[in-house]
Image: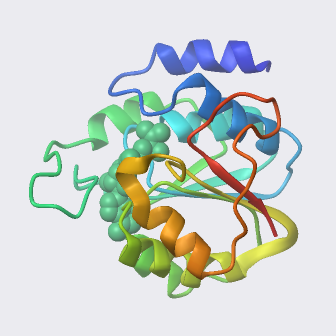
């Protein structure tokens, strides 16, 4: 499927769109060349999951999310049930799996090498440090990690955690030259 065909589907899905086309394109450009294992931390109603699944139909795409309707660790994070929308949006997507738990819980018994890790769970420094330490070691050499909102000044903890873990600042105009909120790193 072309990117344009996939993004048209994304626009027709239920729920907030936190996956603008420049960010979806970053995922598409990496995922389309993968036949393997893609892990996504934080799927909400599945818009990024859908991009990954359709861009990489021969991969297993595993989303990890506690599905508690909470996307920040602040008390005022939204509190609605996202599961009905998520399962409706992902209903016909055969290469998608979900682990309904936190990224920390899912990491405990994880053994499968990962080709692409998309990190879009809790956006604060402490949780980024946890996600990096628990998940990045599972990425294959030559694989990728993409941090959503890396460039968003509202989430400074993401870059701080990446800097402290030795990720060198990437080019913001990556791959297609478009401005994206994603920070992309090759392992
Ligand atoms: C910004 S949203 C993800 C957006 C999604 N990628 C999309 O394209 O719409 C953040 C997600 O992180 C999830 N989340 C919250 N705590 C989490 C945790 N401890 N581990 C993994 N995901 C978590 C939330 O449920 C929410 O779905």
Q: Is residue 77 left or right of residue 151?
A: left
Q: Nearer the viewer, residue 1 or 84?
A: 1
Instruction: Tell whether 60 sits left or right of 50.
Output: right
Q: Quadrant of residue 58?
A: top right
> Residue 182's spot in the image, x, y percent?
60, 46
Whole-percent x and y of residue 26? 71, 38
Quarter of the rendering containing residue 78: top left
Residue at (54%, 39%) from the top-left corner? 48
On screen, residue 54 above or below 167: above
Q: Quadrant of residue 22?
A: top right
Count of numbered circles in the view: 0
Residue 65 appearing in the image: no
User: Which residue is at 82% across, 57% downward?
Assistant: 36
Q: Residue at x 89, y 43 (%)?
A: 33
Q: Position of residue 166 (x, y in %)?
A: 68, 79
Residue sitting at 41 percent across and 27 percent down?
Answer: 17
Q: Is residue 83 left or right of residue 64?
A: left
Q: Would residue 162 be seen by someone viewing this image from the given angle? A: yes
Quadrant of the image for the N terminus?
top right
What colour scheme was applied to this rendering of the protein?
Answer: rainbow
The image shows residue 130 at horizontal and vertical percentages of 46, 81
Nearer the observer, 83 or 118: 118
Q: Quadrant of the C terminus?
A: bottom right
């Amino acid at each position: 499927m072309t990117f344009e065909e996939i993004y048209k589907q994304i626009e027709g899905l239920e729920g907030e769109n936190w996956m603008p086309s420049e960010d979806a394109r970053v995922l598409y450009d990496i995922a389309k060349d993968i036949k393997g294992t893609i892990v996504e931390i934080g799927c909400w109603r599945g818009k990024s999951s859908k991009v990954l699944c359709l861009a990489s139909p021969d991969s297993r795409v595993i989303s990890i999310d506690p599905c508690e309707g909470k996307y920040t660790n602040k008390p005022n994070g939204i509190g609605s049930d996202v599961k009905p929308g998520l399962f409706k949006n992902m209903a016909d997507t055969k290469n998608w799996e979900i682990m309904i738990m936190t990224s920390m819980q899912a990491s405990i018994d994880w053994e499968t090498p990962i080709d692409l890790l998309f990190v879009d769970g809790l956006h604060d420094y402490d949780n980024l440090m946890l996600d990096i330490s628990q998940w990045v070691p599972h990425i294959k050499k030559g694989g990728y990690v993409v941090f959503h909102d890396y460039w968003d000044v509202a989430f400074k903890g993401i870059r701080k955690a990446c800097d402290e873990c030795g990720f060198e600042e990437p080019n913001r105009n990556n791959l297609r030259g478009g401005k994206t909120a994603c920070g992309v790193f090759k392992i």
